[in-house]
Image (cartoon, helix red, strand yellow):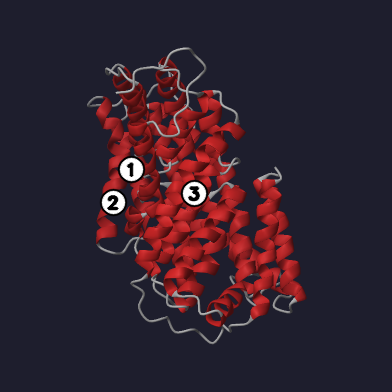
Amino acid sequence: MSTESQDDRLHFHGGSLTALVPILVLIGGLTWISLAEKGGTAEFWVFAWLGIVVGLFFAKNKSKYCNSALNGLSDRGGVTIIIAWLFAGVLGKIMVAGGLVDGILWLGTTFEVGSALFVVLAFVASMVFAVGTGTSTGTALALAPVLYPAGVFLGADPVALALAILAGGVFGDNLAPISDSTIVSALTQGARIDDVVRSRFPLAMSAAVIAATALYLMGQSAGEAATVGTDVVAEPKGLMMLAGLAVVVISALTGRHLVESLIYGIGASVLAGVLIGNLAFTQLLHIPEARGQSTGLIQDGLGATQNAIVFVLLLLALTQVVVDSGIMSRFLGFLQRSVVKTVRQAELAIVGITVAISVPICSNAPALLIVGPSIVKPLGSRFRLSAARKANLMDCAVCSVFYMLPWHIAVMVWHAAIVEAANSYSIFAPEISIALLNPYAWAILTVILFSALTGWNRRFEPDTTTPEVS
């Protein structure tokens, strides 16, 4: 997501604040349809589209406005994420077709896993997958089709279960060495990835324990289990499909590209499904009986991501317009000129600024790119905060409120995956507004504020003196 120069800056009628009109149209529309409990990814397209359209009439240079929107569509980070989704969506469909839901259902009933415990296990499974792959959205697309229906059939609370999958994905984005937020936060501060991950581990794990406790308590409110359809049969052989997940995680942790790892995982899932007799190669690809029908699981997996992809493309265009207006830079400049006299004040300012910038920006890596070099690095360096500490303050802050708001990419994709999984089994799907209860997001915000206030986990660059703290 590129940032603007003075010459390229977009100018709007009515002053710089009108640059926020596109994002306000989007937020207003999402709030309106969500309160009516009619929200969904496809329905949200309209308000992102309207935001772009309305913003055009406020722009002084219409051609520059259109080019800005097109630049957002070509954002490399966004395109990379979309490509990863396409493969994660196929992986999720293959695992379901191979009987992983059946296997998890058998495991839960055989060992009498309680509904609240299953919610926590879903959280842990999502954590592990997200740390291995470094993507919260890919985690939702791969695991929601499996964990959500299995948990609901076992009597798990749907809201707690959906939040467990989202929260686990956030943990991975926060800690994984290959996640875009980890990489961007480290590189903008000149920190080593291994130093960042090692020093962030106590922060992330503390938040994970808090989130797991909250999810367990939320899971206690479970009602009756959903009626299991005739196409779901609890049997252990479906657990063999976990091989695909294992391959993805191991491959990613060994340093291979995410897309490469997902392809290997898809191959392992297909092989496992064929070996246990739950899959046939013709299910992957075949000539349909009639025009318009699916050609198989590959098409189904790709199709499951299309609503989220369209919405994300619109969001990328809309966000680039806001960035190119320069309002973010002016806001950051104002904050940078504020009086910060102590280390504690500097750290709290870094957390607050990062959270504030992440609110209107649809993807967290661009938010870090905006605030990292211009504010966090000079402000933290003034008080000799270590490079890893500055990166941790940024990353933990951007993984908090960002993952509660429905107009952000990760939240939107997660909800779309939950709805898709629910529709596949004709079970209940919660509204996207439950993201406001994201336990890991609240926990990591609490932990990083506690760290900034008390100095826990704080590190300085080598020197003979220690800056004033209070």
Closer to the camera, 265 or 342? 342
Q: Nearer the viewer, mark 2 or mark 3?
A: 3
Which residue reaches farthest left?
Answer: 14
Q: Nearer the viewer, mark 1 or mark 3?
A: 3
Please provide percent x and percent y for residue 217. Answer: 35, 65
Task: Name the secondary structure under disc 2.
Answer: helix
Q: Residue at x 33, y 46 (%)?
A: 50
- Mark 2–mark 3 Cα distance, whole angstroms, equals 29 Å
Could you tell me how many numbered marks the image carries?
3
State the mark number for residue 171: 3
Please provide percent x and percent y for residue 57. Answer: 29, 34
- Mark 1–mark 3 Cα distance, whole angstroms, equals 31 Å
State the mark number for residue 29: 2
Between disc 1 and disc 2, whose residue precedes?
2
Q: State the residue position of label 1.
A: 51
Mark 1 is on which residue type? Gly
Between disc 1 and disc 3, whose residue precedes?
1
Mark 3 is on which residue type? Phe
Closer to the camera, 324 or 457? 457
Mark 2 is on which residue type? Gly
Please provide percent x and percent y for residue 218. Answer: 35, 65
Q: Residue at x 28, y 44 (%)?
A: 25
